[in-house]
Amino acid sequence: MAKLFQKLILIFASLVLFSLLIKLSAHLGWSTKATQKMFDFQPVSQKPTQVQKILAKFKKPSRVEVEVFTQKYSDEISDIKQIKTPLDKDSSFYIQMQLFSDDTDDGSPLIMQLKFKSIKNNSLLSEESYNL
């Protein structure tokens, strides 16, 4: 029991020291990017998780097609392409996902456009767009 308590104190002390170091770096004028490089910290993108939650709201399609029209978010897009979506072979529609952004604007979001199309005649059933 004492060893467990010692480990908990050590973890708590480490977290306190880490937060103090972050505050000190901000006080000294270090940028967030410099701090991230110092700790080799890579923020995790939430875009694939967002896409997975959005796709889960709909009925199961027969297939999902992904079209990419940007080079800007290549890491996130490759993660989005790896998402395993539940499919239904007997479904009457499929999803055409188009991912695009303005490559010339650093602040532009990744946009996902979902087109729900009929399998029988490829007609557009509905369409939705999301800023990721």
Image (cartoon, helix red, strand yellow):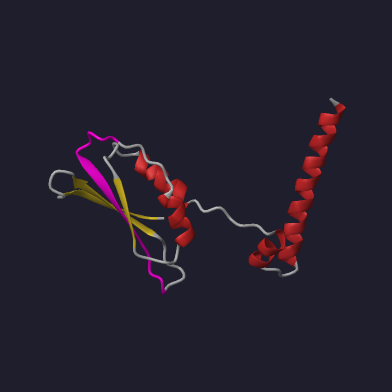
- Farthest residue toward the left? 121
Q: Magenta residues, as a range? A: 88-104
User: Is 74 above or below relative to 103?
Assistant: above
Extreme residue in the bottom direction: 104
Q: Identify the residue at the far top of this view.
A: 1
| Image point (14%, 43%), residue name | 120
- Camera-side residue: 1 or 40? 40
Residue furthest to the front: 89
The answer to whether residue 22 is left or right of residue 56 is: right
Look at the image and tell me in which quarter the N terminus lies.
Answer: top right
The image shows residue 35, relative to residue 129, as above or below, that is below
- Which picture quadrant has residue 130? bottom left
In this rendering, position of residue 16 left or right of residue 76: right
Q: Where is residue 59 drawn, in percent x and y? A: 28, 36
Q: Residue at x 83, y 31 (%)?
A: 5
Asked if residue 19 lies in the magenta stretch, the reply is no
Q: How many marks?
A: 0
Q: Quadrant of residue 73?
A: bottom left
- Residue 25, image x, y percentages: 74, 64
**Front residue of 22 and 76:** 76
Residue at image x 56%, y 52%? 44
| Closest to the observer, 104 or 96 | 96
Q: Where 28 sits versus 94, above or below?
A: below
Residue drawn 28% across the image and 35% down it:
88
Image quarter where the C terminus lies is bottom left
Identify which residue, 72 or 82, lies in the foreground. 82
Residue 128 placed where, x, y %? 28, 51
